[in-house]
């Protein structure tokens, strides 16, 4: 079993930015994905999933709210896109990379049984896993946070830079090369 570092915090605090910085620092050693907002003139419209090797898919959007059985707030969630790209990116990282990065383990993503299974596989593997995870209570996420070998750090505006340096040190301690 590898080591697991979970980063939690309020929405908008910089969890995705941290995962992107870690991905840049790790380069080809890392596999996985991050999520990014889709914004328009009227604000946030949805979310896209971006794999570390450059594949992109929209997986949640306000226009899909009535078209899918899976909803979070005003967003409809496309589990097929998450499973096709996100789950595949986790499994590919387990097969060919030294570390797995996942942004994020949240309410939308946790609708997917395949996503939860891929995270269980990552947790059982010898590869380190760094993931962002919801701060809000969720039965599966809360149980994942309590797994043996899990460290869970809360990102805040005041500790953002310190936590980035701490995460880089965590990676180095796990034998990974980081470029700053």
Image (spheres, grey):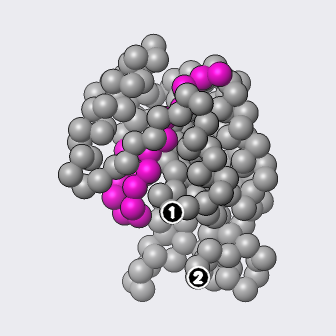
Q: Which residue is mark 1?
A: 136
Q: Is residue 99 left or right of residue 124?
A: left
- Residue that sits furthest to the top in the current view: 175
Closer to the chain start, of discs 2 and 1, is 2
- Reply yes or no: does residue 87 show up in magenta: no
Residue 110 makes an appearance in the image: yes
Q: Who is closer to the viewer here, 36 or 162?
A: 162
Mark in front: 2 vs 1: 1
Q: Which mark is residue 74?
A: 2
- x and y, in percent, of residue 77 in the image: 68, 69
Indicate whether residue 4 is drawn in magenta.
yes
Percent coordinates x, y for residue 9 in the rendering = 40, 55
Q: Is residue 54 left or right of residue 170?
A: right
- Start and end of the magenta stretch? 1-20
Look at 39% across and 25% down and name the residue there. 170
Query: Where in the figure is residue 94, as x and y percent of width and height?
Result: 67, 28
- Quarter of the picture containing the N terminus is top right
């Amino acid at each position: 079993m590898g080591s697991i570092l979970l980063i939690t915090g309020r929405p908008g605090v910089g969890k995705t930015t941290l995962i992107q910085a870690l991905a840049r620092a790790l380069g080809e050693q890392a596999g996985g994905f991050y999520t990014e907002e889709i914004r328009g003139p009227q604000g946030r419209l949805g979310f896209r999933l971006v794999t570390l090797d450059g594949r992109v898919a929209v997986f949640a959007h306000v226009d899909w709210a009535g078209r899918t059985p899976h909803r979070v707030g005003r967003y409809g969630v496309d589990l097929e896109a998450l499973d096709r790209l996100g789950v595949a990116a986790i499994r590919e990282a387990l097969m060919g990379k030294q570390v797995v990065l996942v942004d994020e383990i949240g309410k939308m993503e946790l609708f997917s049984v395949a996503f939860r299974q891929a995270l269980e596989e990552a947790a059982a593997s010898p590869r380190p896993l760094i993931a962002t995870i919801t701060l809000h209570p969720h039965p599966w996420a809360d149980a994942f946070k309590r797994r043996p070998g899990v460290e869970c750090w809360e990102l805040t505006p005041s500790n953002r830079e310190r936590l980035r340096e701490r995460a880089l040190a965590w990676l180095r301690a796990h034998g990974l090369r980081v470029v700053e």
